[in-house]
Amino acid sequence: MAKETAAAGKIVIDLGVGDPDIPTPAPIVERAKHALDDPANHRYPFGAGLWDFREAVASYMDRRFGVTVDPSRQVLPLLGAKDAIAHLPLALLDPGQALLFTEPGYPAYRASAVLSGTEPVGVPLLESNAFLPRLEDVPAAIAERAGLFHMNYPNNPTGAAAPASFLRTAVAWAREREIVLCHDAPYLEISYTGRPAPSVLAGVDPDAAVVELHSLSKTFSMCGWRIGFAVGSESVIAALARVKSNVDTGVFLVAQHAAAEALNRAEELIPPLLEIYRRRRDLLVGGLRAAGWRVTPPDGTFYVWARVPTEESSVEFCRRVLRESGVVMTPGSGLAPAGEGYVRLAFTDSEERIAQACDRLGRR
């Protein structure tokens, strides 16, 4: 519909996709340019990755989250966090086992279950529970069949953050049931509380079957570079590495050099990007409120999760807004049945465009 609307001559403002428009910071690009000139970086990278990158990951996790990991055994480079989301079920589950995931959420969680022949089971996130899963509501029969639980905070799409106390509860809940807990955490640094959101690995027993997925896409505006990393349980990392060794040959070495630069300079590079998102968040929330919407500012991510301000379904509402205003939003029901009644708006466009979108929505 967006393509049809644009083809008809209407200027479309797309707030539907979380693809940052901010260029990758210059020091990261410069490191990549230098690495590209070295022929050693033109060869197969293989799975374990550059030692410099793995050391940078370990240092970053210690400085930013107070988490100690062994770079030789507890760090694995990824082709973006989605890489691990897709491959962890193949590494850890047998066909027919249950894969739990929070929803509404990233569609790749459900897709990874379908593709691996496991049973997808969404754990609802409700506004009445601050968009945290009610673990006690997971039926015992399902928990008994489950081998993996994908959880995501700060949360896409709701923008909710999980307190450290809840993360500890989730770790204990999963461990008691022998379920691997995977915290998909690409937005830990996109936090508006004055500090990074907590890592699920903070204070966790190294023997616990817990792994956390990080992506440089959001934190450093590196979506197209396709690089992230998994950290945590040595046995889970090893299982994931075995699968990946059969489906890819690692992350482009130039991207690993660039990512090491990014992580080593996180304290310098992240604040300017975060300030841009903070201004955009406040502009979008203020504009929607002025248009009569009931909106809560997100604690993290670059998404606003808002109730549909009419009696329409989320799909009907998004279709009509697109026709009338040329503004693209994501209908909540497209992310899960639990998302019905909501829409997601991404503030990954300029302040000027966001202001234009709010003006159009106010005139709707």
Image: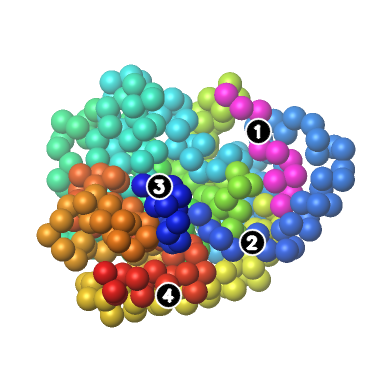
Residue type for callout 1: Gly
Of mark 3 and mark 2, the one earlier in the sequence is 3
- The residue lying at 29 percent from left, 38 percent from top is 100
Of mark 2 and mark 4, the one earlier in the sequence is 2
Judging from the image, what secondary structure is the residue with disc 2 in? Answer: loop
Spatial CA span between label 3 and label 2: 28 Å
Residue tagged 1: 250
Residue tagged 2: 23
Residue tagged 4: 355
Quadrant housing residue 283: bottom left
Spatial CA span between label 2 and label 4: 21 Å
Judging from the image, what secondary structure is the residue with disc 1 in? Answer: loop
Left or right: 21 as drawn, with respect to 134: right
Residue tagged 3: 4
Spatial CA span between label 1 and label 3: 39 Å
**Is 291 placed above or below 259 here?**
below
